[in-house]
Image: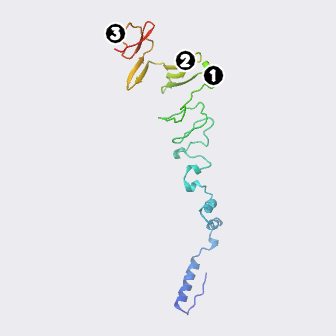
């Protein structure tokens, strides 16, 4: 762009004309900018600019609460799935909150905490009521071998079971064994006979039909 500069005249007038010429010369010609670039330049504020760029609110906040669609990667604390429903495995983020009903699920965790203001957990038979119901917690090793269970393990009676299928039972209190039950109760006349028969102190035995426990 050419600007007429007077050859003669006050020094201040020529200096002013030169500054105007420099300003106009450095001005970006609209023809050099893309239509998209021009559409961004006339945005009044950051929100309008984000809309032009197609950026969601999460681009500014960085908060997962502003992520309305898509799947957050597991490495970023996501679930690995859009919805934790249906079949297959879902990797949950740290400290997830679960609501509703979980059916036939396997939880692989080194430790977890269940917190509630009333019953922490309910074990419920899904198809049988009354004495025929079966509802229990079982304990297995890494190979899947069952070692025992607690609960309503038999639909043929009304008993609740505390069962060890590979050994005895111990009731532990105040840092020490209080009562031991080692399989079938041995029949001994007294503590001395029970000791001779290998019954440890605190272990149950029987004297005929009387239930005994060795204390000495």
* Secondary structure at numbered mark 1: loop
- Of residue 96 and residue 202, the one placed in the foreground of this image is 202
Q: Extreme bottom residue here?
A: 8
Name the side, left or right, on which 130 lies relative to 143. right
Kind of element beneath mark 2? loop
Q: Mark 1 points at which residue?
A: 129
Of label 2 and label 1, which has the lower sequence position?
Answer: 1
Q: Which of 60 and 17 is in front in this view?
A: 60
Q: Which residue is drawn at 60% across and 64% down?
A: 45
Q: Which of 195 and 19 is in front in this view?
A: 195
Disc 3 to disc 1: CB gap under 8 Å? no
Image mark for residue 192: 3
Q: Where residue 113 sits in the image (x, y, percent)?
A: 49, 35
x%, y% of residue 96?
54, 40
Pointer 2 residue: 159
- Using a 10 Å C-alpha cutoff, classify the residue at mark 2 as few (fewer than 14 neighbours), some (14 to 19) or many (20 or more): few
């Amino acid at each position: 762009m050419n600007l007429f500069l007077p050859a003669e005249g006050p020094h201040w007038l020529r200096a002013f004309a030169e500054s105007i010429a420099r300003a106009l010369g450095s001005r970006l010609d609209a023809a050099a900018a893309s239509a998209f670039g021009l559409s961004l330049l006339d945005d009044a504020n950051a929100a309008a600019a984000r809309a032009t760029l197609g950026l969601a609110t999460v681009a500014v906040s960085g908060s997962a609460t502003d992520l309305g669609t898509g799947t957050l990667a597991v490495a970023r604390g996501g679930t690995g799935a859009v919805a934790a429903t249906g079949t297959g495995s879902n990797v949950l983020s740290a400290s997830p909150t679960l609501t509703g009903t979980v059916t036939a699920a396997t939880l692989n965790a080194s430790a977890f905490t269940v917190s509630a203001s009333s019953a922490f957990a309910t074990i419920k038979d899904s198809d049988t009521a009354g004495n025929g119901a079966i509802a229990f917690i079982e304990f297995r090793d890494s190979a899947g071998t069952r070692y025992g269970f607690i609960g309503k393990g038999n639909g043929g009676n009304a008993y609740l079971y505390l069962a060890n299928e590979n050994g005895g039972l111990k009731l532990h209190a105040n840092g020490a064994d209080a009562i031991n039950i080692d399989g079938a109760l041995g029949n001994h006349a007294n503590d001395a006979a029970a000791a001779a028969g290998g019954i440890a102190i605190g272990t149950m035995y029987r004297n005929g039909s009387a239930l005994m426990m060795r204390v000495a």
